[in-house]
Amino acid sequence: MPQFAIVDTHLHIFDPIRLTYPWHGTNPQLDGPFLLPDFDEHCASVDVERMVFVECGARDRVAEAQWVSQEAHADPRIQAIVASAPLEKGAAARPDLEALAELPLVHGVRRLIQDEPDDDFCVR
């Protein structure tokens, strides 16, 4: 075993029973939930001490961060959240950003662009 802490800096857990994901149903391997017990089962040989959850693209971005915050109360290995925010909306993103700022574990946001149809989406 390593003599240092293992930190998973890109944890994805998702629950399509709680949240809607646009990609759900497009890949049989991802059709069900993937929760912390599933993570533990797949990573049983590695002692992960801390985790950073990275958003999974739920339609309700704030609800996803709130849900993961609840999961972190049950499993303190989740130490931080990188949430999703509609940054392309400019000032109109403020309500989402303010709601995310209320969650102590949210330390950053990201906006995925790979599924955007516009060729110039990333330069807006």
Image (tube, helix red, strand yellow):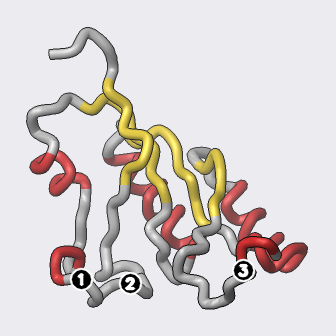
Dot 3: element: helix
In the image: residue 111, left or right of residue 25 = right
Which residue matches tag 1? Answer: 27
Q: Residue at x 36, y 39 (%)?
A: 8
The 10 Å Cα crowd at callout 1, few under 14, some 14 to 19, many 20 or more, is few
- Badges 3 and 1: C-beta atoms under 8 Å apart? no
- Badges 2 and 3: C-beta atoms under 8 Å apart? no
Is residue 20 in view from this perspective?
no
Q: Is residue 70 above or below residue 24?
A: above
Q: Amino acid at mark 1?
A: Asn
- Badges 2 and 1: C-beta atoms under 8 Å apart? yes
Dot 2: element: loop
Q: CA distance from mark 2 to mark 1?
A: 8 Å
Q: Position of residue 95 (x, y in %)?
A: 78, 73
In the image: residue 63, left or right of residue 53 = right
Residue at the right extreme of this rendering: 91
Which residue matches tag 2? Answer: 23
Q: Quadrant of residue 3?
A: top left
Q: Mark 3 or 1 closer to N-term?
A: 1
Which residue matches tag 3? Answer: 121
Q: CA distance from mark 2 to mark 3?
A: 19 Å
Q: Residue at x 23, y 82 (%)?
A: 27
Q: Quadrant of residue 2?
A: top left
Q: CA distance from mark 3 to mark 1?
A: 25 Å
Is residue 105 in view from this perspective?
yes
Nearer the observer, 99 or 53: 53
Dot 1: element: loop
Q: Mark 2 or 3 closer to N-term?
A: 2
Q: Position of residue 67 (x, y in %)?
A: 45, 64
Q: Is residue 45 above or below residue 118?
A: above
Total numbered labels:
3
Image quarter of the N terminus: top left
